[in-house]
Image (tube, coloured by chain):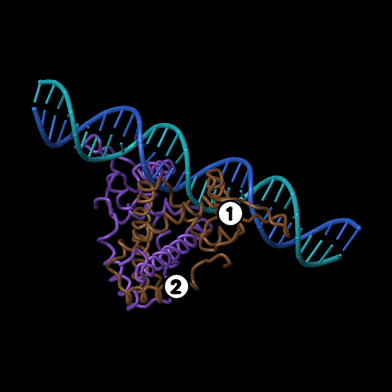
Chain colours: A brown, B purple, C cyan, D blue
DNA sequence: TCTTTTTACTTCAAGTATAAAGTTTTAAAT
DNA sequence: ATTTAAAACTTTATACTTGAAGTAAAAAGA
């Protein structure tokens, strides 16, 4: 089985297709957040992760959830903290650990964004019905094991 | 139909799934290129686009192909040019236009990467067969119209 | 013609991202 | 108890990315 047989080539093309869709959708949502809410995708992603968990999250856990480096998480949290949208708390048990969470302001801010964001995604994916979504879920699950998910 | 009915919520979850797969795969390939070939994903992407076209490409066309800003394309091409992997040529007909193409060195360099890159993707997508790939293609095609593809 | 608008590209400032090095704290192993 | 190793963050250097401003050339309009 050559490294470039038909199946291998098709898998490559499929990856490029997925990447393209992801970039287009991200670009659209970035623009949407910028124009309508004067904010950015990384900020939104951090807030979404914190909102989803609903309680203080370790910095390292946060970067794992978002699949970004620790240093990156630090920077984005820095900015959100400066804007009063998130807060850091040193852990009591382990002095190395820092917990992050949304402030009240941050929670209110995110709630407003979340609905608009969902509506926008709903519009972008409008051509996909329940069956399609199930199909995608199953396909993505099969890729899950292979990709590097550092250690979640 | 509320902005947050079941279907809307499922579309959002599906988007997050796609984004997650894309990021994991990108992270894996970034690491792969860094460790084995001491290069980066943006450089690879530019080279791949130029290689694919096979003849000099306008800067603006390049950034459209990659779905990145013009300024970004300029920067990455700058670096590749400094390394002797690509070359710029001013257009004869239109003095505003700049054509970019791979140098001989660049072409040889990319060829080596391309096979390894395809093999790596082939490994990551090993669980998907011909039918699955066709299914994904059809699904992605249906999203195509909705997303912002600036003006390709 | 000549003014205005559009197009192509680069430059700039700010934000985002990584990898690697550094600091502090905890856990493990003598 | 001490040393060693590992873990959690932050900081640093460098690269990437965007959006906007700037420059130059071409096209459109008056």
Q: Is residue B117 left or right of residue D25?
A: right
Residue at the spot of label 2: A143
Q: Is residue D12 left or right of residue A43?
A: right
Residue at the spot of label 1: A70
Q: Residues within 10 Å of mark 2 (few under 14, many from 20)?
A: some
Q: Tell me what residue is drawn at x 43 percent, y 41 percent.
A: B82
Q: Tell me what residue is drawn at x 31 percent, y 75 percent.
A: B135
Subunit ID for the residue under disc 2: A
Q: Horizontal and vertical percent for residue A28?
A: 34, 54
Q: Horizontal and vertical percent for residue B128?
A: 39, 76
Q: Earlier in the sequence, mark 2 or mark 1?
A: 1
Q: CA distance from mark 2 to mark 1?
A: 25 Å
Q: Residues within 10 Å of mark 1 (few under 14, many from 20)?
A: some
Q: Do the numbered discs 2 and 1 sit on residues whose CB atoms are within 8 Å?
A: no
* Snapshot quadrant of residue D5: bottom right
Do tags 2 and 1 sit on the same chain?
A: yes
Q: In the rendered view of the protein, which quadrant contains the C terminus of chain A?
A: bottom right
Q: Horizontal and vertical percent for residue A115?
A: 39, 59
* Snapshot quadrant of residue C12: top left
Q: What is the number of the mark on residue A44?
A: none
* Snapshot quadrant of residue C28: bottom right
Label 1's element? helix
Q: Horizontal and vertical percent for residue A108?
A: 48, 53
Q: Tell me what residue is drawn at x 70 percent, y 55 percent.
A: A96
């Amino acid at each position: 089985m050559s490294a470039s047989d038909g199946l291998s080539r098709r898998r490559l093309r499929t990856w490029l297709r997925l990447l393209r869709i992801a970039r287009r959708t991200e670009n659209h949502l970035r623009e949407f957040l910028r124009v309508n809410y004067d904010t950015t995708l990384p900020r939104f992603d951090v807030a979404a992760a914190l909102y989803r968990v609903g309680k203080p999250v370790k910095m390292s856990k946060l970067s794992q959830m978002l699949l970004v480096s620790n240093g990156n998480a630090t920077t984005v949290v820095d900015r959100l903290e400066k804007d009063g949208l998130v807060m850091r708390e040193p852990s009591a048990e382990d002095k190395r650990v820092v917990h992050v969470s949304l402030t009240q302001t941050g929670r209110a801010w995110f709630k407003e964004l979340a609905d608009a964001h969902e509506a926008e995604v709903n519009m972008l994916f409008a051509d996909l019905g329940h069956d399609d979504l199930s199909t995608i879920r199953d396909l993505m699950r099969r890729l899950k094991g292979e990709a590097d998910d550092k250690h979640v």
